[in-house]
Image: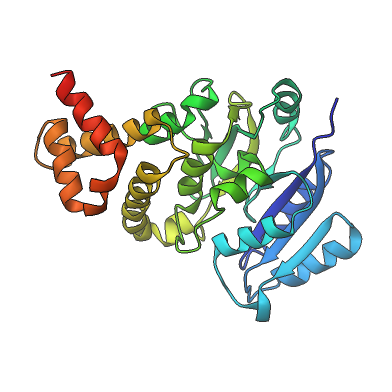
Amino acid sequence: MNNFNVSVIIPVLNGDKYIERAIESAIPLDSVVEVIVIDDGSTDSSLDICKRLATLNSKIKVLTHKGNVHKGVSASRNLGIYNAQSPFIAFLDADDYYLPNRFDSEKQLFNKHIDFDGAYGATKIINTVTGRSELYTYSQIIPPELLFKALVWQNYGHFHISTLTIRKKTLIQAGMFDVKMPVAEDTELFFRIANIGRIYTGNISTPISIRTIHNDNTIIKHKSKYTIYNKYLYKKILKLFLFSTHTSFNNKNEIILMLNHHNILFSEVMNEKKFLIKLCITYPLLFICPFIYHKYFQLIRHK
């Protein structure tokens, strides 16, 4: 059996209530060779806690941005990725934690599939405000070549970044996290790694991590930002994937179908040919995209 080594990356901003639990959930796991904690300009005792823990265990590495400034979760994760020594990367938010089975399925998939670039699984969401909990997962196994489509349509569920294990090489090839996105940055990255990597379904029946919801969560404190940056996300997907030579025809087609679906639901109803023309008028650069011509004449041919 080959060694399956993982670097765990934990960004923290004023998380002194939770960070020790997060770090200690990753340290005992035999696949974890290092835990990289990036303090993102905390003004509480987070950095002191991390430094103290680092003196007790050589697996823990503590990083900060130059001048201890705040740069955001994307820049912090990217700093961790650059400094990671393992071939595989896993992520953990400071207020979440891993369960003992975190990498069991990943190790099996790694040894089973020679093209393994990563995997995802189920997380249990515990809402400390309402007292409710739920399993956040996919409803079925998704073949790697269909993951992009599943992400586009979101009809099989979701997975959380705390369950993602991904090859460092694939992350770098995909472009890592977009530092312009303060929210939904993980969702946007999922599209890019699914487009170029072989990402397998891991344990989706039982949780491999715990996500806690509380009043300090970004999704609660900055809920309005998701509306703004979801629009940015889809515009970026459109521009990035339709022009990319690394994107398959099927994936490009799913993007067009998705955009046309949203057009039908939320705007005027038009057929796909008219929609493609409107799309090109809205985004003139699409006129030079070979896929648009291919798709348009394919629709005419099958009329």
Across and down, in percent, residue 185 comes to 48, 53
Q: Is residue 154 visible?
A: no
The N terminus is located in which quarter?
A: top right
* Residue drawn at point x = 84 percent, y = 34 percent: 3
Nearer to the camera, 254 or 71: 254
Across and down, in percent, residue 88 comes to 72, 43
* Residue drawn at point x = 60 percent, y = 31 percent: 121
- The residue at the far bottom in this view is 67
Across and down, in percent, residue 24 comes to 79, 50
Q: Is 124 left or right of 257, judged from the image as shown?
A: right
* Residue drawn at point x = 13 percent, y = 19 percent: 303
Nearer to the camera, 40 or 20: 40
Residue 31 lies in what quarter of the image?
A: top right
- The residue at the far top in this view is 302
Q: Is 302 left or right of 80, judged from the image as shown?
A: left
Across and down, in percent, residue 205 comes to 59, 23
Q: Is 104 left or right of 15, judged from the image as shown?
A: right
Tell me how the rendering is colored. Answer: rainbow
Nearer to the camera, 88 or 18: 88
Measured along the vertical axis of the image, is residue 234 above or below residue 54? above
Q: Is residue 194 visible?
A: yes
Nearer to the camera, 250 or 142: 250
Measured along the vertical axis of the image, is residue 37 above or below residue 34? below
The tally of labels here is: 0
